Image (cartoon, rainbow, N blue to C red):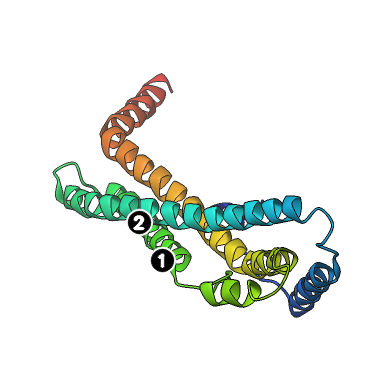
Amino acid sequence: MNLSELIWPRLQTLTTQALKEQETGHQQDNTSIRAANWDVDTDAALEEARRLDDAESDRRKTADAKASLYLAAVTALAPVLASLLASIWSDKSTIGYSIVWLGIFLVATLYLFRAGIWAFETLKVSTSSRVDASDLASLWCKTDPKPELVEKLLLAVRHNHTGTHRKLSCIKMTHAFLLRAFLSFTLLLIVQVAWVPVCQLVALVITTIRCTC
């Protein structure tokens, strides 16, 4: 991770070539699923297909739950940061202190705002695929519906991969920005508490050096 990524994380954007390769891989997976012989040990295949479908659904739910939690954290931190703004008018404020304090405050606010945007992006409604009631009704009109049910479940799981990966990427970005907002908030408190003692210590050291010279 370079310095710019450390200061301001970015979600890597796929190139046109990478998108084409991703789509090709999706089509190849779908072809493999349709070509597979699900008549062999169908019950085991159906159990695994259901497990994969449940796991994919759990991943989406986990991302949404984390996004909701992070939004609550953003909502809680925002008024705290706003209330700290009043301390800039305290008696200990100097030009140097004001510049440093406002700089860190601005950075923390930007991090917090971006974390909220990514959390909303995670919660944004996206298309997903599933085996619905009409699918089951049409399948059970056939003599042996289980093999085709396995196929439909696996196709739904594969179709949902892209949306789930997007949600997980968004929640990772939310976490990254919220972590930086928290660190900035902590630094803000440290500056607020330690500014006067540090300035006094520096002045004392300078005075001592001058007296020694």
Quadrant, the C terminus: top left
Residue identified by numbered label 2: 71
Observer-nearest of 94 and 160: 160
User: For the point 32% across and 39% down, which residue is it?
Assistant: 191
Image location (x, y in percent) of residue 54:
58, 54
Q: Mark 1 vs mark 2: which is more N-terminal?
A: 2
Residue at which label 1 appears: 120
Query: Which residue is at 64% across, 51% downward?
Result: 51
Q: Nearer the viewer, residue 14 or 81?
A: 14
**Residue at x 72% of width, y 71% of height:** 143
Q: Quadrant of residue 30?
A: bottom right
Amino acid type at circle 1 is: Phe
Q: Are marks 1 and 2 in contact (CB under 8 Å)?
A: yes
Judge left or right: residue 4 versus residue 213: right
The crowding category of the residue bearing disc 2, from other C-alpha atoms within 10 Å (few below 14, some 14 to 19, many at least 20), is: many
Q: x, y (%) of residue 18?
A: 77, 73
Q: CA distance from mark 1 to mark 2?
A: 8 Å
Task: Estimate the x, y position of residue 78 in percent, counting from the top left.
Answer: 27, 55
Which residue is located at x 81 percent, y 62 percent? 38
Find the residue positioned furthest to the top: 212
Q: Is residue 81 above or below residue 183?
A: below
| Secondary structure beneath label 1 | helix
